Amino acid sequence: MKLSRRLGLIVGSAILGLIVVAGVALITLRATMLDELRTVLILAAAASLREISAGAEATVAKVRDVASATAEQSQAGTCVAQHVERIARMAEESAASVRAADEDVKRLETLASELRESVARFRL
C-alpha cells in the first residue's frame, strides 16, 4: 500500500477517534449539565416551598387572630345583649310601678273627694 493511502487511513482513523471522543465528551457534558440543572431546579423548588410554607404559617396566624377577635366580639355581644335584657326588665318594672302609682293616686283622689264631702257635712 502506498504511504499516502496509509496516511489517509491513519488520519481518517484519528479523525474518527477524535469524533468518538468528542461525542463521548458531549454526552458526558450533557449528563453533567442535566445533573446541574436538576440540582438548580431542586434548590429553586425547595426555596419556593419554604416561601409557601412561611406564607401559610403567616396566614394561619392571621386566621387565629381573626378567630380570637371574633370570639371576643361574640362575648362582648352576649354581654351587651344581657345588659339590654336587664334594662328592658327594669323598664317593665318601672312601667308597672308607674301604673301602680297612678292607681294609688286615683284612689287617693277618690278618698280625698269623699273626705271633703264628709268634712262639708260637718260644717253645715
Image (cartoon, rainbow, N blue to C red):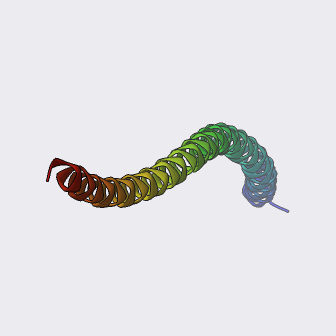
Q: Position of residue 98 (x, y in %)?
A: 37, 53
Residue 92 location (% of width, % of height): 46, 58
Q: Residue at x 45, y 58 (%)?
A: 96
Outermost front residue:
124
At horizontal 47% and vertical 55% (from top left) the residue drawn is 88
Residue in the image at 68% along x and 39% along y: 57
In the rendered image, residue 49, in percent from the top left (x then y), is placed at: 70, 45
Q: Determine whether, in the image, residue 104 is placed left or right of residue 38.
A: left
Q: Say left or right for 67 vs 108.
A: right
Between 82 and 75, the residue placed more toward the observer is: 82
The quadrant holding residue 117 is bottom left
Total residue callouts: 0
108 with respect to 33 (left or right) = left
Q: Does residue 106 sit above or below 54 in this rendering?
A: below
Image quadrant occupied by the N terminus: bottom right
Which one is nearer the viewer's eye here, 84 or 66?
Answer: 84
Residue 64 at x, y percent in the picture: 66, 42
Along the line of sight, the residue nearer the viewer: 78 or 31: 78
